[in-house]
Image (tube, rainbow, N blue to C red):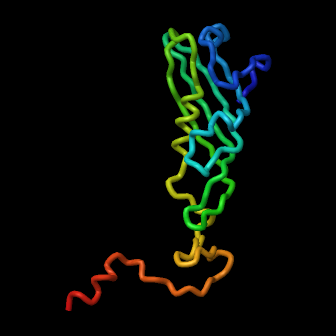
Amino acid sequence: MNDFYRDYDVPQDLKFKTADILRMGGLECSAQLSPKYFERVFTAPNKITAVTVEISFSVADKNILVRGRVWGKRDVQCARCLKMAAQNFEEEFVETYSTKSEIIDIMLLVEQTLALTEEIRFLCKPDCKGLCPVCGQDLNAAQCGCKPECLSPFAELKGKFK
């Protein structure tokens, strides 16, 4: 993205004055944001550790088109072994705002975009063995020797219907 407005200070809360964008005839900017702004986006213990955003404002007759990209790093918990692992993320967003509004708040748009990137079930590696359901041993590190119980919900019915 071109840096046309080097002297434009991108607000950390991502609230832009519509009058500034109209006066400049658009704006392209980028900023590194503090992860503290995104503490409530993911469910604990998952958290965002680094965020960068690029934003492009294009002015039309009655609207301002906002295109953006957000990327960074997050710490997420494996669904099987419960270990935390670092993961990169990147997502794009597009939204239209009226030129009549005084402020264009991009923070909510970035938060929503980040929330959509959270995986329902993250695995630290595709072949993660998880934890032993009996003793809790991390099966990626070592085998525990426990005998696996039958986890089928129908196991109790096995001998009842002969």
* Residue sitting at x 55%, y 29%: 108
**Res 54 → quadrant:** top right
Q: Residue furthest left?
A: 162
Outermost residue toward the right in this view: 7
The residue lying toward the viewer, choosing from 54 and 131, is 131
Residue at the image point whose x is 56% and y is 10% from the top? 102
Residue visible at 59% across and 61% down in the picture: 78
Furthest toward the front, the residue is 135
The C terminus lies in quadrant? bottom left
Q: Is residue 112 above or below residue 153?
A: above
Q: What is the quadrant of residue 114 in the picture?
A: top right
Number of marks in picture: 0
Q: Which x, y percent locates residue 160?
A: 23, 87
Q: Residue furthest bottom?
A: 162
Which percent across, then down, holds residue 50? 71, 42
Instruction: From the viewer's side, name the closer residue of 9 and 133.
Output: 133
State the image quarter where residue 25 is shown. top right
Q: Position of residue 40 (x, y in %)?
A: 58, 39
Indicate whether 127 appears above or below 157. above
Q: Position of residue 8 (x, y in %)?
A: 75, 17
Above or below for 109 versus 89: above
Q: Residue at x 70, y 30 (%)?
A: 1
